[in-house]
Image (spheres, rainbow, N blue to C red):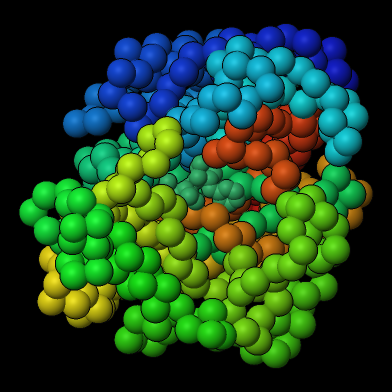
Amino acid sequence: MNNIKSYVENNRDRFLSELIDLLKIPSVSADSKHKPDMLKTAEAVKKNLLEAGCDSAEICETPGHPVVYGEKIIDKNLPTVLVYGHYDVQPPDPLDLWNSPPFDPVIKETEIHPEGAIFARGACDDKGQMYMHVKALEYMTKNDALPCNVKFMIEGEEEVGSEHLAWFIENNREKLQNDVILISDTGMIAKDTPSITTGLRGLSYMEVEVTGPNRDLHSGLYGGAVANPINVLSKMIASLQDEDNRITIPGFYDNVKEYSEAERAKMAEAPFDLEEYKKKLDIADVQGEKGYSTLERASIRPTLDVNGIWGGYIGEGAKTVLPSKAYAKISMRLVSDQDWENISELFTKHFESLAPKSVKVKVTTHHGGQAYVTPIDTLEYQAANDAYAEAFGKDPIPQHSGGSIPIVSLFEKELKSKTILMGFGFDTDAIHSPNEHFGIWNYLKGIETIPLFYKHFTKLKQAE
Ligand code: BES
Ligand code: MN
Ligand code: MN
């Protein structure tokens, strides 16, 4: 497969311009006004799949945003790779913090992307990474280098909890049959330090509403005598973590998998520079659960974070008011073997119990998903390892990530195959933030590495 490198080099400009076209469509799944854009993106992905060599591709309606499915079956007796990705993106807000419009992609050089990076919402998460697979397929079909069957399942609701993908999978088990699931929707450590994601955190996303008096009150006439729901909510939230930054919800840590000293020492071998980390974020110090390193806190330990808090007067100037209501969105990142539904229940019970009689509390669950950990002594991991070794000239480091792709644990349960998380983004690519970008080097390296996975996987599978 020596010519993959030259194929990528020769087609570089087209690979970039096709991705840029895809990035121009604002496929924000959370915002109903973008519903037509979701369909437009799905149509574009379907067309891309057919052009890249799929025998068939279709837009599959769901009760929510559609799933794009495509396949190329060359021989029923050969193994099948199922590629998963998502064409939806996070809302681009806050817009004023973007240096160029989020859906008007531009290429700019940065310190760690001297070859240039594409700046646009979805550049890395996940349109750019998903599209690497489409171009890898194009290479394989055009160069007679596709060694096995391939199926694509590209969804439009990942950023809002994949609500209807479970439904889609349950209704299409047969069609989705595969030998391995391949996903590029995570990151890698650095250009000279390839890594494969072997763990993802779970998620439990809650919203709370605290109600005090039945209307907003004059804070002079009533302040001090009637509970202020924002004051109360702040106290309740503050009490959710103790002085060691451990979460105080009873039972929260009951099922948390503890890693052995040997396993932790192995994980600590991954390169990480705390000073650099702080400098990049412009913070004087880090903070987290006592007894764990920064890397551990951000990967193998569960967390609780307020994502947004609001209520009262936030307009210009000052208004003296004792508000009637206060709200917060609170997420918990979970690890194996915590169960997200159980954690949501524990949170609800505990949060309700924290409320003084002076307020009413309403807790709702938004969405969630289980954590995911994959062993590395499998044929699937070996194939990925071999692909990276060939593309990078060194073995990749297996690494737990702090992010979540809740649907992954369901894939294994429903489809009974292993997942390989081949991510090519960097943590600094600002996914979900203003100025999201994806390095051109990363994009092309991904396209180059993916066919090698197909090659090694098919080889190992046939020798089984
Ligand atoms: N691709 C990310 C998850 C990710 C990014 C994992 C980097 C590992 C490294 C995915 O699109 C995402 O953003 N997931 C959400 C969860 C979802 C339910 C909204 C997340 O992690 O917040
Ligand atoms: Mn993603
Ligand atoms: Mn995302």
Name which residue lies at 33% across and 27% down: 31
Answer yes or no: is residue 361 visible.
no
Farthest residue, direction front = 221
Foreground: 23 or 133?
Answer: 23
Quadrant location, the N terminus:
top right
Q: Is residue 323 above or below residue 399?
A: above
Q: Is residue 340 left or right of residue 171?
A: right
Residue 131 drawn above or below residue 50: below
- Picture residue at 56% right of the left edge, 85% below the top: 244
Residue 153 lies, in percent from the top left, at 43, 33
Say whether residue 176 is left or right of residue 127: left
Q: Is residue 302 left or right of residue 158?
A: right
In depth, the one of 175 and 294 nearer the eye is 294
Q: Residue at x 54, y 55 (%)?
A: 403
Q: Judge whether residue 45 can be spotted in this image.
A: yes
Q: Residue furthest bottom?
A: 261
From the viewer's perspective, tell me whether residue 289 is left or right of residue 278: left
Residue 230, given in percent of the width and then of the height, sits at 31, 60
The residue shown at (37%, 29%) is 29
Q: Residue furthest left?
A: 214
How far across and down, in percent of the image, does residue 450 sit? 69, 37
Q: Is residue 329 above or below residue 295?
A: above
User: Residue 68 appears at what percent x and percent y?
Assistant: 39, 25
Quarter occupied by the C terminus: bottom right
Of the pair 44 and 248, the residue shown nearer to us: 248
238 over 218 or under it: above or below: below
